[in-house]
């Protein structure tokens, strides 16, 4: 038997819709990262982009356990003394709350060219409205997969 290696002709991408309301951030990000990479498929090939397109709605209503809302995201501007930080709560209260989910998913993917391409297949929306109805996404209920996936405020 030969080892199966997927080719671009073998890849079939689906559209997945995930509602993040009440779902714990880390568990949500790991499920999204697995879907983006394609690890849920039996024909997974590590060097190919074979994951699904993922749409996340209600990203501003994501939950965190413990004191994680007070933890900081750090980045550097590239200039001397240019370290910047914001807490996750500040980002969620700000103009772009979807960036918390984007950063969590990005950090669960490997840091290479392929994962940067896979991140382009992720669409995160702060509210319940999204403009992707034409793709007919399948709904993935992350909250009912495991009782630990949800948390009330």
Image (cartoon, rainbow, N blue to C red):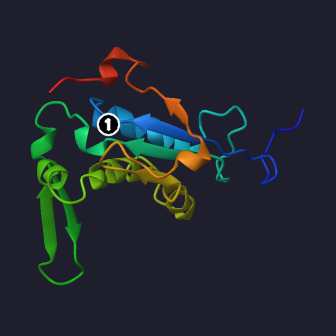
Side of 33 where 12 appears, left or right:
right
**Which residue in the protein does label 1 denote?**
26
Q: Quadrant of the N terminus?
A: top right
Give the structural element (helix, strand or loop) at label 1: helix
* Nearest to the observer: residue 74 or residue 96: 96
In terms of image quadrants, where is residue 73?
A: bottom left
Residue 54, relative to residue 65: is it above or below? below
Q: Quadrant of the C terminus?
A: top left
* Nearest to the observer: residue 128 or residue 123: 128
Residue 22, horizontal then vertical, whole percent: 27, 29
Residue 1, relative to residue 135: is it above or below? above
- Pick out the residue farthest to the right: 1
- Residue at 44% x, 19% y: name it: 145
Side of 122 where 49 appears, left or right:
right
Query: How many numbered discs sit on the rendered protein?
Result: 1
- Residue at 30% x, 44% y: name it: 59
- Residue at 34% x, 42% y: name it: 128
- Pick out the residue farthest to the bottom: 79
Residue 29, horizontal then vertical, whole percent: 38, 40
- Pick out the residue farthest to the top: 147
Q: Residues within 10 Å of mark 1 (few under 14, many from 20)?
A: some
Residue 71, horizontal then vertical, whole percent: 13, 47
Residue 50, horizontal then vertical, whole percent: 66, 48
- Residue at 45% x, 26% y: name it: 141
Residue 103, relative to residue 15: is it above or below? below
């Amino acid at each position: 038997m030969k080892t199966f290696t997927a080719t671009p002709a073998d890849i079939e991408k689906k559209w997945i819709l995930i509602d993040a309301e009440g779902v714990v951030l880390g568990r949500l990000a790991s499920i999204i990262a697995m879907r983006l990479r394609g690890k849920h498929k039996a024909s997974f090939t590590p060097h190919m982009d074979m994951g699904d397109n993922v749409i996340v709605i209600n990203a501003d209503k994501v939950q965190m356990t413990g004191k994680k809302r007070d933890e900081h995201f750090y980045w550097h501007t590239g200039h001397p003394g240019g370290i910047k930080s914001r807490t996750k709560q500040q980002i969620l209260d700000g103009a772009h709350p979807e960036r918390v989910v984007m950063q969590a998913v990005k950090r669960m993917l490997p840091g290479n060219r392929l994962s940067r391409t896979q991140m382009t297949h992720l669409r995160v929306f702060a509210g319940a409205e999204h403009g992707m109805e034409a793709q007919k996404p399948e709904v993935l209920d992350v909250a009912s997969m495991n009782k630990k996936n949800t948390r009330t405020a």
